[in-house]
Amino acid sequence: MNTKQATSIWVLSDGLPGHVNQSIGITRALDDEFPHEHEVITVVLQLRHKLLRPLMRVLANYFPFLLSGFALRVFYQHDSLPLKTPSLIISAGGNTLFANIAIARIYGVANVFSGTTKGYSHRLLRLIFTVTPLKDPNNNVVLDLPPANFNLNPSVEKSSGRFYALLIGGEGAGYCYQHDDWESLASALGEISQREGIKWLLTTSRRTGEQNERLLCTLLPPECCEKSVWYATTPAKVVKQFLNESEAVFCTEDSLTMVSEAIYAYKPVITLQPRTMNPDTNDAKALQKYQDLGFIHRVKIRDLTDFDVSEKVFCQSYPDINLQIAQAVKEHCL
């Protein structure tokens, strides 16, 4: 990418907010380092058939000379590609990997990916961002936190009172929630509210599900919540608002995106675990790293009643992730 004139960065989107926000987070980091020197163009694409993913990996790894606009159309439904030639390709999420590699090869430009490479050769990417190390370190930059399109506005007027935020996910990523998990969570929320003189700012998510929401709503002491958003019935984008107003953030561990957004609030973060959980190796390593750095404390839901935020030590100095990203892109891609 030539930083002496305006350049075009293509962000490849699979439509999943967590992946798109990581890509936009990278472009925001570049905005901080190289303001007004590039435009960002989003290209939306969708896999035609997920069963073809093994074939796509074989093609990219062993026959990269066959990567072309035709190959892209075979495997994806996508927007018309922009007329302006890209200077850099950025994406996150395994479904974008083939497109990232193919488009970078078609135009002969550098490409950046956020996340593990899902069996694709590291050599097909100029720069790979992860939060835990990959086996090949040559083009892998390990960040303290994943890229994020996230920042709080401390100047926004806050409601009076003391609040803890609670971000609730649900089934998936190796985490399984049973009736007794929701029962223990509801009981703990009431106990902590009464003991510490706080009210909860609670939101569920797409992953929670209407049945679990109804159960939790029934079990939860209504007086312990200042605001509650039940996503299945009344969805609302309140995460930034709740993080801005809260003293501490509690969130379930099943979404690393949710956990990292909580950490980016730069407040005490407590991640909650159901009785049954088996996160994959990469997620487990990331959570352990966050705990080692003091970004989070990990707590079993059944033990939450006895948890006291004031008794725990959390990180006091957070890394500048945008600077880490911008320096890595400058070193590897410019």
Image: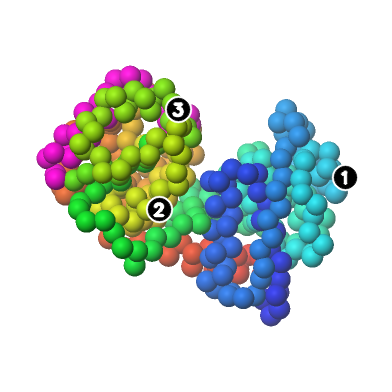
> Residue 9 occupies which quadrant of the picture?
bottom right
Q: Residue at x 53, y 46 (%)?
A: 18
Q: Quadrant of the N terminus?
A: bottom right
* Residue 152 image offset from top left, x and y in percent: 39, 60
Q: Residue at x 48, y 35 (%)?
A: 206
**In front: 213, or 169?**
213
Mark 1 to mark 2: distance in Å? 41 Å
Q: Amino acid at mark 2?
A: Lys
Our reading of the magenta stretch's main secondary structure is helix
The residue identified by callout 3 is 209
First in sequence: mark 1 or mark 3?
1
The residue identified by callout 2 is 240
Q: Amino acid at mark 1?
A: Phe
Q: Amino acid at mark 3?
A: Gly
- Protein image colouring: rainbow
* Residue 283 image offset from top left, x and y in percent: 46, 39
The residue identified by callout 1 is 70
Check if residue 179 falls in the magenta segment.
yes
Looking at the rendered structure, the secondary structure element under dot 2 is helix
Looking at the rendered structure, the secondary structure element under dot 3 is loop
Labels 1 and 3 touching (C-beta < 8 A): no
Check if residue 290 falls in the magenta segment.
no
Labels 2 and 3 touching (C-beta < 8 A): no
Disc number lying in front (1 or 3): 3
> Residue 245 occupies which quadrant of the picture?
bottom left
**Is residue 21 depicted above or below 215 in this figure?**
below
* Residue 259 image offset from top left, x and y in percent: 40, 45
Q: Is residue 117 visible?
A: no
Highlighted magenta segment, given as a residue range: 169-197
Is residue 161 left or right of 315 when viewed as pictured?
left
> Residue 212 occupies which quadrant of the picture?
top left
In the image as oriented, which residue stretches furthest toward the bottom? 4
